[in-house]
Image (cartoon, helix red, strand yellow):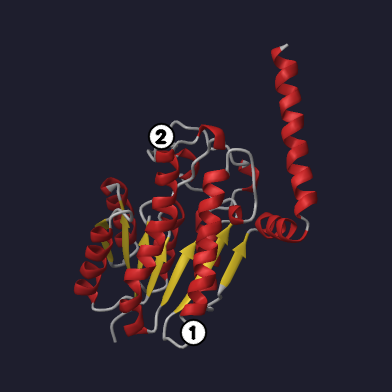
Amino acid sequence: MNAPSIWITGGGTGIGKAMALEYTQRGYRVAISGRRKDRLDEAKKEIETLGGTCLSVVCDVVDVDSIQKALEEIDREWGRIDIVVANAGFSMSARIETLTFEDWRRQLDVNVIGLAQTARYALPYLEKTKGRVVLISSVMAYMRYEKSGAYSASKAAVTAIGETLSLELLGTPVTSTVIHPGYVESEIGQVQTDGKFDPNAKDRRPSKMLWSADKAARVMANAIEKRKRIYTFTGHGLFAQFMCRHFPDFTFWIVGSNLRKRSREINIHRS
């Protein structure tokens, strides 16, 4: 029997790359896609160094033709697709009053529409293998911070899409998982509002709370293997999700207090 295969969008860096390496160690043939060929080539080399089989495909999830061609290439190469991980996305950090129409379109086109279309076109292939579609959301689907409006909105939409898809797949051979990571090491904090990667940009996420990508990939793969419908990980991620769902006003007060304190410190410094 042929080894199972997995396709991971955004598989050249961060969580996507870590998942590709994890699934290589689990005996999967791994297809990775993204827009940056140099990063895909680097990830492919690492996978093959581990003795794995890798197919790298340049694919932009905002282009339907690109998604279809990627699926066709993987199917032609291996004859089966068992898992599809819709992971491609980026984080936009800006106040809502400054976000333009084009900014919103970029954020939602990639994180929401591109993800939904990846799942849509993957379903016929997954039906043949009784496979699984995985949507990568975020704890930010529940949590709110200053300058997180566009990104949080996109991830809340991903969660809604995933929960709806789980219902719509009832009675079919395909199942789905929505994953909400907390803070994980990745390049997501260095992607600018225009969607371009800046290696010199500072990642503003709290470094002490960041999980390693390898550890994150391992627990995500375990959740997918168990066919969990919804999965949230990192201790702080679970705590944030719980507080936001059950104590929204208190959470708002805490976040607001921190913002007010920082604002006072900035004003004192300026004076």
Label 2: element kind: loop
Q: Residue at x 23, y 60 (%)?
A: 65
Percent across and percent down for residue 19 are 44, 62
Amino acid at pointer 2: Asp
List the residue tagged with mark 1: 170
* 208 left or right, relative to 51: right
Query: 207 above or below 139?
Result: above
Quadrant of the drawing holding the N terminus: bottom left
Q: Nearer the viewer, residue 119 or 225?
A: 119
Q: Residue at x 40, y 55 (%)?
A: 88
The CA span between labels 1 and 2 is 42 Å
Residue 124 found in image quarter = bottom left
* 206 left or right, relative to 169: right
Percent across and percent down for residue 121 are 32, 70
Label 1: element kind: loop
Query: 208 above or below 244?
Result: above
Q: Is residue 103 visible?
A: yes
